[in-house]
Every structure is written in C-alpha cells, then in structure tokens.
Image (cartoon, rainbow, N blue to C red):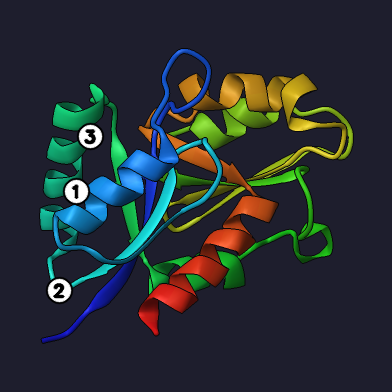
C-alpha cells in the first residue's frame, strides 16, 4: 500500500482559537495515522497515511471538531507539493526568516486581486502567485505591512499562510515522516 506524507495547515489557529499540539498528536496517532508530528502552536501537523487527501481532511476535521471544538478549514499538501512550493519561490534572495510568507490557496485568486493587493505594497514589498501559492515578501515585517493586512480579504480565496522558517521546518518534518 502506498503511503503519502501530508503537511496539514490548520486555518486560524492562535489567539482565542487553540489547537493543543500534544493532544492533537495523540488523537491523530490514535486514529491510525503514522509518523505524526506537530510544529509550534499555530496549526501545523505532519503525518503519513494511505488515505487520499480528501479522506485525510475529512478524518482530521472530525477529530478536531469532536476532540477540540476546532471547525475551521484544514489544508493538506503532499511532501511533493511542498517541495514544489519551496522550489517555486519567486524571491530566492529572501528565503530565510519571517519576511517571506507562503500562503496556500484553496483556489485561484479572484480576477484583479493580485494587482489590487500590489497597490498596498510599500517600497521593497511584493506579492507573486505561482500556481495555488501566494508568496509575500515584506522586508519591513509582516505584522506592520499594509499588503499583509489586506491580503486575506483581498486575495478573494480561502488560504492559510506560513512564514518561510515554518515552511522549511515543515519540509524537514515531512521528509522524516515520508521515511
């Protein structure tokens, strides 16, 4: 049976919405997922399974709703898709740190959305979309960027973003999970 390593990105974890990592790992392993790992308390998990992406999302969503009252979107990407996300980075000179974010998109951005978002960028900031990933470069900081502030609503499609440090750590964890 073919096993696939998936990276799970939970939307909207942090602040009032918590998803405790140790109990989540235990619940996922108890449901039969293999090589389960979590990374920081902001909604990231890695696992290996023979299930399809849709089955993984449905199963994990049920576990999260029943066990933790978490009912927000869950995005799942295979290790191969994550490797492509990293390889397609249009800002290779800005790979490290918190100034580069990758936002996994649930669909294609609304027409004109990217150009509209670019109007909020200050000098040095930029946004590019490659496939279903939006890359935001905010050298002055994501938390103070108008581009970043307007991104979620302006992109016009469900998404969840991670800084490049997290992107690289999830790659490492998924490679371990894949064996």
Residue 59: give x, y in percent of width and height. 12, 48
Vertical side of 2 occupied by 49: above or below:
above
Residue at the spot of label 3: 64
Is residue 129 visible in the rendered image? The answer is yes
Which image quadrant is residue 140 in? top right
> Mark on residue 57?
1
Q: Which residue is drawn at 76% across and 28% down?
A: 121
> Mark on residue 138?
none
Tell me the quarter of the image containing the N terminus.
bottom left
Q: Which residue is drawn at 40% across and 43% down?
A: 22
Number of marks drawn: 3
Residue 14: give x, y in percent of width and height. 51, 24
Q: Residues within 10 Å of mark 3 (few under 14, many from 20)?
A: many
- Determine contact: label 2, label 1, CB under 8 Å: no
Tell me the quarter of the image containing the C terminus.
bottom left
Residue at the spot of label 2: 50
Closer to the camera, 150 or 86? 86
Vertical side of 179 occupied by 130: above or below:
above
């Amino acid at each position: 049976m073919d096993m696939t390593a998936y990276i799970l990105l939970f939307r909207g974890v942090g602040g009032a919405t918590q998803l405790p990592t140790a109990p989540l790992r235990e619940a996922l392993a108890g449901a039969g997922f293999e090589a389960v790992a979590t990374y920081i308390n902001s909604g990231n998990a890695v696992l290996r399974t023979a299930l399809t992406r849709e089955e993984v999302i449905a199963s994990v969503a049920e576990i999260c709703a029943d066990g933790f009252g978490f009912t927000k979107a869950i995005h799942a990407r295979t290790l191969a898709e994550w490797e492509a996300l990293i390889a397609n980075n249009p800002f290779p000179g800005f790979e490290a740190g918190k100034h580069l974010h990758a936002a996994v998109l649930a669909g294609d951005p609304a027409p004109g959305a990217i150009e509209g978002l670019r109007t909020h960028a200050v000098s040095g900031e930029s946004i590019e979309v490659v496939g279903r990933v939006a890359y935001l470069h905010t050298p002055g900081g994501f938390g103070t960027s108008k581009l970043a502030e307007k991104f979620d609503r302006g992109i016009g499609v469900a998404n969840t973003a991670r800084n490049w440090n997290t992107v690289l750590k999830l790659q490492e964890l998924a490679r371990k999970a894949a064996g």
